[in-house]
Amino acid sequence: MTGDAREKDAHSGVETTGHEWDGIRELDNPLPRWWLWVFYACVAFSIGYWVLMPAWPGLNGYTQGLLGKSDRREVAQALKALDVTRGAGAEKLKSATLAQIESDPELQAYALQVGQSIFGDNCATCHGAGGAGGKGYANLRDDVWLWGGTLEDIQRTITHGIRSTDPEARQSQMPAFGRDGMLPAAQVTDLTEYVVSLSGRPANAAAVARATPVFAEQCVACHGPAGKGDMALGAPDLTDGDWLYGSDRASISGQIHNGRGGVMPAWGHRFSPETIKALAVYIHANSGQ
Amino acid sequence: MTVVIDRTTPPSAAKSPGPVSAAALARRKADQGGGLYKKRVPIYPKLVHGKWRTIKWAMLIATLAVYYIVPWIRWERPGALPDQAVLVDFTGRRFYFFFIQLWPQEVYFITGLLVMGALALFLITALFGRLWCGYTCPQTVWTDLFIAVERLFEGDRNARMKLDGSPMSFNKLWRKTGKHAVWLGIGFSTGGAWIFYFHDAPTLIRTFWLGTAPLTAYISCALLTAMTYALAGTMREQVCTYMCPWPRIQGAMLDEHSLQVTYLKDRGEPRAPHKKGQSWEGRGDCVDCNQCVVVCPMGIDIRDGSQLECINCGLCVDACDEIMVKMGRPKGLIAYDTDYAVVSRVQGAKPTYHPVRARTIYYTVALALISGLMLWGFLQRSPVDLHVLRDRNPTFVRLHDGSIRNAYTLKITNRGFEPETFTVGFTGLKGVTLKTPGETASQGLLTVTVKPDEVRAVRVFVTAPAKALPAENLPVAFTLRSNIGSTETRTVFLSGEANAR
């Protein structure tokens, strides 16, 4: 079509572009004026943007722009500003003891808020958003504690963890009586009946009698003669209604067979001491203490 | 657009061409080169004197005075609370109105007030027509003020028309510049007064000029300056005719018994010019002097009947009365009257007025009902509030001895201006232990102190012995007692029976 006079569409009187598809010709209507102006404004804006803002990549970095905008620096400033807004509460947390925090209503309210957000971000993965735990993960809301439930105990557990790689972490291991062949399967079954009887539930009396010497020999060292457990060793009380790995016979015998012990990571190198204080106060408060 | 509601002559079949679509009308207009939009015909309202004009001036002064003075009224409040009588405190999240202090959760009182306002407007409209539009609407008040300024700089109707028709000159330039400058000044003072409703006025007036006021103050001020200038200066009657929904809504409230500015066509027609000494026999009182048209700020001819644009301001009444007095005829050719009265007179009957009719009764009853409800709600309003949020995760905790604990977060509101000590109790379950973090457990009541004008969230752990729990869910309640008020909030205690181990 080059060189030809522009063809006019008979119906509308508008020139065509000369493009044709299956008999349909494209009209050469001008772009709407507002659209053009927006387009020119965008072009002008982009030139201004290149000059003022970081825009073009180069071999060694990028063009910085006259306004000197830097997201990294803004983040750093925002973090500094955050420290300022945290202000007095954070400072007080640093110097106060755990007991002081708990007895000062305002400081406690602050610690509870900090603790709640830290708990939600870090602890809820295992202990649940409400702290009620789950099978193998301790329930932090009740009054049963494996490693102690005082403010200091909680602070220590969070800082160093349990069975973690932290040198100060508390360690203990329940033997895998069945898996390691320490006890024959029949004795594991008898012990299961014995443990069921400890929590006051009906159990096979003959099996309990057979297991009594076995319990005295194998279990008493950690769980105590009455099965009351020992918080220093993280040995649970077997006489109460709280079961970390389940209360039914299969769960109990499974635990005797395999001797599981959970790992709680150490948080001391991740959180500041005052954050751990706040977290300890939060957990302590929510356990109803 | 002019809608003529003519109830005096029956519609003739020949006149009506049948329904025409809006699109067809628009096309028809566009074909005449008018585009889709009607071009504004400038209106040059002439100054008029008379009863209604005086009332209108008084209303203008009164409404503007209220608007400008209210934020400056002081009202002593204790402590750090603001001492401004009327204040919408967004940062503090409070609304103050003299002795009333509303919290955001009580915004329904403002909703109720708006509903009352709407119903009152319905009632007034049904009885007396669009009085709101004519006398108190901010659009009317500010337009009136702007027209007064315009008259000050450019003279009355004829002078203004002449000035607009003349080529640019020094005289025209300074008059126009002066007018627009004063308009902008009024606009700025409108915006400037508006922001005082949201901040402490004496503080803001200082910080505003120091450049340290909140950004929202500057933005609001600029926005209202521009809006006032545009709406009252350049758009005027177009706001009422095209933008405002009220003329349409109020049109539905009017009926033939509503008092409206009415041309008494029974008395005025047939109209014709009148020379001194001519007889008034066999003709109407209207001398076709056009005064009612030239004074009209909406640019309509009231003799065409009741119409959408009419704001019921009564300026044409004053204009016509003036002429009638000069002519030696009785006043009130244009008057606040009803369509029904006009028809009655045409039929030779004595006009009757019916202020009590179905719709005015509905509106009154509805208004009384809502007002009563609001008043009751306001009198019931307690300075104390208790909200109970039961922990849902975990729903309950089983302790080592089998007893069950539920945790609740109590939100205790102290709307008073003094610190208040509350006694929190728990009913519905015997033998429970209550405990808040950091305090010793209690068999009975807890004591919580809440600062003035604050909400305090308190965690409460309720422990019940297993044998005290006969069912899965037990209806219980927290009670709150204090010197300033008491309340009770019901909740549920989950016994864990559904999840027994």
Image (tube, coloured by chain):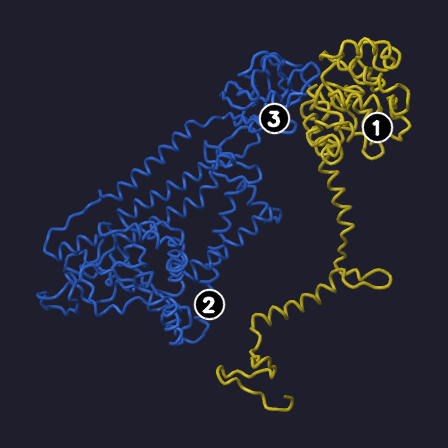
Chain colours: A yellow, B blue
The residue pinned by badge 2 equals B174
Percent from the top left, x then y, of residue B71?
A: 48, 41
Residue carrying label 1: A161
- Left or right position of A255 against B16: right
Label 1 secondary element: loop
Foreground tag (3 vs 2)? 3
Q: Quadrant of the C terminus of chain B?
A: top right
How crowded pointer 3 is (Cα within 10 Å; few <14, some 14-19, many 20+) is rated as some
Q: Alpha-carbon neighbours of circle 2 within 10 Å: few (<14), some, or many (≥20)?
A: few
> From the viewer's perspective, is residue A99 above or below residue A87?
above
The chain ID associated with circle 3 is: B
Q: To which chain does the residue with label 1 belong?
A: A
Q: Whole-Å distance between the Cαs marked 3 and 2?
A: 69 Å
Task: Where is residue B426? Give x, y as percent.
Answer: 56, 17
Query: Can the viewer see residue A172?
Result: no
B34 horizontally vs B411: left or right: left
Image x and y of residue B53, in percent:
29, 54
- CA gap, disc 1 to disc 2? 83 Å
